[in-house]
Image: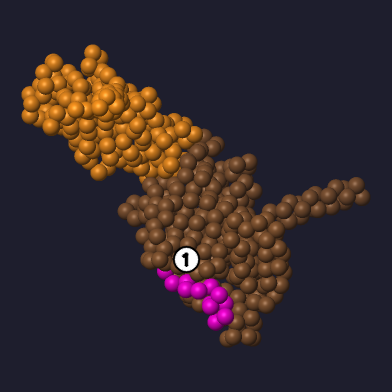
Amino acid sequence: MMKSSSIRIVVLAFAVVALASAALASTAGAAVWKFNGTELSGKETIVGAAYSSSLNIPSAATVECEHFLYSMKISNSAGKGVGEVTEVPLYECKVIPSTCTVAAIEPEKLPWPTKLSTVGTTDYLVIEKVSVGITYGGEECALDGTKVVVAGSAGGKVENTAQQATFDKATFEATGTVLKVGSSPVEWNGVFPTEGFEAHREQALEG
Amino acid sequence: MAKLVRLSRYLLGGIAILLCVPAGALAHEKEFAKFNYCPSKTEGVAHCLYSVTNSGEILLGKKKTKIEAPVTLQGGYSKENSETHISTFTAASGAETLVKTKENVEGGLLGLVPPEHSPPLVVLLSKYFFENEITGVKATLELAKPASEIEVSNYNLLLGSGLALRLPVKVHLENPFLGSSCYIGSSSSPIIWNLTTGVTSPSSPNTPIEGKPGFPETKEEFRIAQINENTLVENNWSAPSASGCGGILSFLVDPVLDLMLGSTTAGHNTAILNNTIDTATATAVNNH
């Protein structure tokens, strides 16, 4: 027969485990991809174009792109929403201040792995191994002819009602992701519509 | 007579201005003044560089030299090669490319360095006895090859991987006993530093160390890029034996110095340079 002190220890241990589990669930967890409330089976391709997007290097420069497209393949695997960004064509980009131009901008080392991550009650799309090469131009631009690589990971909030994923400072902080140039963190602000392109064509993606 | 006085004043004023700016140097405005010695009008020079190593250390065998007096590297460099991302360097105009700066060698000639936790009095006495004019040794970093053999890569520097700066150097050791021609490294046998802001892969017994790309900041509407808190590292370099130390007694002194330094083969030496790097295009410099 178990002594009362032993029972107290066991109960306490269960309580600790339960609390730890609850804490983990509220910090980060996995979610699955859904379309119209139904869990995705098989694979789907998501294609979108950012409403607005900019890469801001604090104390340095901001790169804005008129057209920031992306293509992402997604699936659910072992209860987790996963995928990979396969294409990110970027067009009509400019630098602020205008001393510099964007001579070339292109994503590198594609595909970039993605996953759905739940922080608290919010679903986030986390893109890993992001790498974008920006070659600056401009006769008086300090980095004229120099290629600078923005690299790291990016986390964006999946908003089911608005049918979009938003990347900003708050979503980076929530997901613990960071993009960098040199040692400097880069702010990526962008709003991307999320819509199926194959079997779930014109259906909004949900986290 | 009054005309003659005015003419003399103009002439003297002109001479004074000429004396202030060395031959080959151009006087640029404000933030661009740091590029006064950039060969910005030389063909092939696309950018100007002004890099100051504010601190750091050089460990050569058993001898450590802390960089306490800032060391300047300046000159021009070409557009980067689109495949290798390496730029070639052009020497400063009207000034030294690698400005000769004397640094104290810890422990001086006797090589006696008190442990870091020693009482302040012991440290002070050690400096007094072993880093004085007689036994103290000054080390000056000098270019061992023409500046054209320096290579830079802004791409790798900011990426935190690969070669950021290739610097062929020699170390000039000075002390009344060592004479004025005591060197580690020479133009025929230079010390080659392949500096990186990433992680090194050194030979044993050294272990990997990591540099820092630093924080880019722009000035003058992106006409000047300044990289702060940059750290370049290299700990896989080798150094040749000492030469020319002790004047006519160098055949005796060189081996003694080598013995004091210990092994200086790859894996026994380290260079850590903490820098502030400024760069601008030659066009921007010429226009300001």
Question: How is the model colour-coded?
Answer: by chain
State which chain disc 1 sits on: B
Q: Colour of chain B?
A: brown
Where A39 falls versus B164 (above or below)?
A: above
Is residue B264 found inside the magenta-colored segment of the image? yes
Instruction: Please tell me how many numbered marks the rendered image carries.
Output: 1
At 31% across and 32% down in the image, what residue appears? A154
Point out the stretch of residues depicted in magenta.
B255-266
Query: Chain A shown in which color?
Result: orange
Quadrant of residue A162 within the rendered picture? top left
- Residue type of the residue flagged with mark 1: Asn
Badge 1 element: loop
Viewer-closest of B144 and B132: B132
Residue topped by disc 1? B269
Q: Residues within 10 Å of mark 1 (few under 14, many from 20)?
A: many
Q: Position of residue A50 (x, y in %)?
A: 28, 24
